[in-house]
Image (spheres, rainbow, N blue to C red):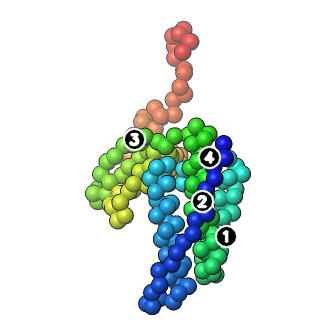
Amino acid sequence: MRHILERHTINFPQTESLPVDGVRVQHVITELDSVAVRFEKIWGVDRLPRLVSDATRTKWDAQMEKLNLALEQNDSNMVQELAAGCIRGWQVMDAEAKAAGHKPPQTPEAWLCRMGDRTLAIVATEDDAAIYQAHLPEGSNTVIWPLQAITNLVGEQYEAWDRQLVKLGMSDVAAEKKKPVGTFSDSIPF
């Protein structure tokens, strides 16, 4: 299924407070950001490019790389052209993901708790963390941790925790954690 997209043209406001190139770049990026936020609220932060074909994802990555280079060089004409392409890219990825049968996530599942400094901590799966990230109000006192990040952290600290348990005289707890699973004395094979 092929989707035909309208060519996106960005019209610039005229202002005397900033150099024309600066206004053009700012306006283009503001418009591109609003499109990105709209799609990320639907699909989650950084999730949509993972749902499309390798060819589309590669083209998207190349377009973003070119846009970043044009921004570094402050080339307003190139920024305008590439940003318009990125907006079309969001539309293409959305259409391709839907055509492949992907659906935007519904209500994400997460564990929420307050830390000592009253920061709200949200722990969720990778995809659900992306949804929360997309809907997080700017400046909110919230951190979002994907489960994989928690798993990595625990894995890095596991040995250190065992040493601390032994130091605290809780070597029986450390030893209990290391008991092999499945060594039972009964004959039931599960």
Q: Residue at x 65, y 59 (%)?
A: 60
| Vertical comparison of 94 with 24: above or below | above
- Left or right, 45 with reference to 53: left
| Vertical comparison of 139 with 1: above or below | below
**Dot placed on the residue nearer the N-terminal end, 4 or 3:** 4
**Dot placed on the residue nearer the N-terminal end, 3 or 1:** 1
Which residue occupies the foreground of this view, 82 or 8? 8
* Residues at discs 2 and 3 in contact (Cβ within 8 Å): no
Q: Which residue is mark 1?
A: 66
**Dot placed on the residue nearer the N-terminal end, 4 or 1:** 1
Q: Secondary structure at mark 3?
A: loop
Task: Calculate the distance from the C-alpha at mark 2 to the C-alpha at mark 1.
Answer: 21 Å
- Give the quadrant of residue 115: bottom left
Residue 34 placement (x, y as % from top left) = 46, 64
| Vertical comparison of 117 with 153: above or below | below
Q: Residue at x 52, y 75 (%)?
A: 11
Residue 89 placement (x, y as % from top left) = 61, 58
Which residue occupies the foreground of this view, 43 or 109? 43
Task: Calculate the distance from the C-alpha at mark 3 to the C-alpha at mark 1.
Answer: 35 Å
The residue type indicated by label 3 comes to Thr
Task: Calculate the distance from the C-alpha at mark 4 to the C-alpha at mark 2.
Answer: 16 Å
Q: Which residue is mark 4?
A: 96
* Residues at discs 4 and 1 in contact (Cβ within 8 Å): no
